[in-house]
Image (tube, coloured by chain):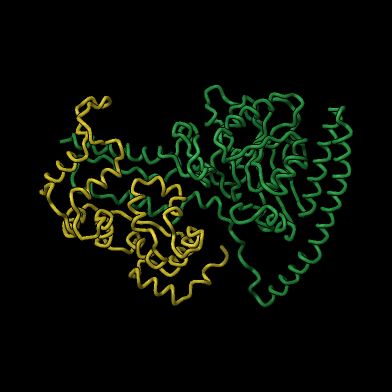
Amino acid sequence: MGNTSSMLTQYDIEEVQQHCNNAFSQQEIVSLYERFCQLDRNGGGFVSGEEFLSVPEFAVNPLSQRLLRMLDGLNFKEFVAFLSAFSPRATVQQKIEFIFKVYDSDGNGKVTFNDMLDVLHDLTGQFISEQQREVDLILEMPLFTDCKQVLTKVLEEAGYNKESLLVMSDFVKILGSSGLKMEVEVPVD
Amino acid sequence: MSSGKGGELIPSSSELDLDRPNIEDYLPSGSSIHEPLGKLRLCDLLDISPTLTEAAGAIVDDSFTRCFKSNPPEPWNWNVYLFPLWCCGVVIRYLILFPVRVIVLTVGWIIFLSCFIPVHLLLKGHDKLQKNMERALVELICSFFVASWTGVINYHGPRPSMRPKQVFVANHTSMIDFIILEQMSSFAVIMQKHPGWVGLLQSTILESVGCIWFNRTEAKDRETVTKKLREHSQGVDNNPLLIFPEGTCVNNQYSVMFKKGAFELGCTICPIAIKYNKIFVDAFWNSRKQSFTMHLLQLMTSWAVVCDVWYLEPQNLRPDETPIEFAERVRDIISVRAGLKKVPWDGYLKYSRPSPKHREQKQQSFAESVLRRLEEN
């Protein structure tokens, strides 16, 4: 991998910094570029899904497939913009916008019941399945073992229903007050 | 294990289950997805930030890739005074040292082959004599190899004795680990079968010290190899086995998880720790970036290969220990001695994907906390 920062000029760094709204410092951008080159093993200028999945910590994450859809084919500038929501300098608004984008897979600005159900399925796997009620042998009480039921119940308690289409402002209302912590530290040599 | 379409290994989940001690012990403590805090609300279900943070953290930096990163040394020759000095160094290394070393190595090979071939062919009847002579000759050629990189090796600790039911394990940085250890005492090593001239050496010369071959890509290989290991370790007259339980070369700053195979043989384990001094040369063989030939050439054009080898106290399986715990304990001993950081990953993840068990564990704990909170009022 050699001396990669020589391939990234000062002009490039500033352009990337502007594109991500100054979410990262110049040093962090250089580190991210080294990391990007490390992941982009075939040197195609973007990191493919396979290359991301070769990081075991990423591959075991329940939301990896969803994120791959957003990450696939991004060049370095877009890669940094993607990660900007995780910068300590990012606002809560930006973080909620990122979460919204993860849910809104078709990108039409509206999150449907099915979108939320899909994410819930990703997070719980087979452990809350679409089956009849079962008795939990450990807790010894009847369970709702259906994702749909769980989601419907919780939505209705919050004042929505199955037909509701949530938009960005709804997400801000729901998540804005819960003290969102979503930060990642970029290692700088 | 079953083979996938591309010939890659798809481990059955039960197998990797056994292979993996508590991975949660190693992951950062903020990694529990949800702490139960009263009734489940919509914001709790929609807030996927912990999972996203973990994913982004893995994208930005992960402990597995760090194990295989060759860190180039800081360039020190950027100064107008130091640069000419560095140039002189290059001239000396490539034009003086390298030819001398090539000559030394060639002489060594000539001596070795002219003794080995006759011994191998003529002494067929006298097994014990033949074995001893072949062992001595292999030790000799390894010494020549080490001399050809100007190897300065400090051995610490009592030299291992040849006793039956004894297996040696060491951390793995490059194939030269074997050469360095073989120089001092004869081992039978278990190695991946390589193509090219290395493979030729493996099948001819190394056979004489009793080496065992495995093939990572073959599905049924693991059982055959375990059987061979067991047979070899029980044999009285065989060379002691040397095993690199990491299964792959790591960059001498980290250690990946030890495979339990060596620790299930019912033998005493003698740990060996190897640490290379990076000031002289980075001895990590990054097999994805370099062929072994290039790696050797790189070593032969450096100043020296300086390393420390520690023979550590032999360990036995304790009555209340599983082989995996035993492997982890020995890994701890070796990592502490050689100053390596431990990571909870299986070295074979270089070649295959992690088992779905890891993801399922996370999903299960999240599902349980959701269901539990749902019942609270």
Q: Residue at point 20% right, 60% down?
A: A109
Residue B120 on image: x %, y %? 85, 36
Identify the residue at image location x=55%, y=28%: B323
Which chain corresponds to the colour green? B
Residue B190 appears left or right of B92 = left
Q: How many marks?
A: 0
B37 or A34: nearer the eye? Answer: A34
Q: Which chain is yellow?
A: A
When asked about the image quadrant of residue A136, the answer is top left
Residue at x 68%, y 27% (from the top left corner): B233
Residue B12 is at least partly visible in this image: yes
Residue in the foreground of this view, choosing between B288 and B29: B288
Front position in the image: B122 or B57: B122
Query: Residue A135 location in percent, x, y?
Result: 22, 26
Q: Is residue B88 left or right of residue B225?
A: right
Image location of residue B183, percent across then percent down: 77, 42
Q: Quadrant of residue B190?
A: top right
Residue placed farthest to the top in the image? B319
Q: Is residue B312 visible?
A: no
Residue B200 is left or right of residue B25, and the answer is: right
Query: Residue B53 at x, y = what percent?
Result: 35, 52
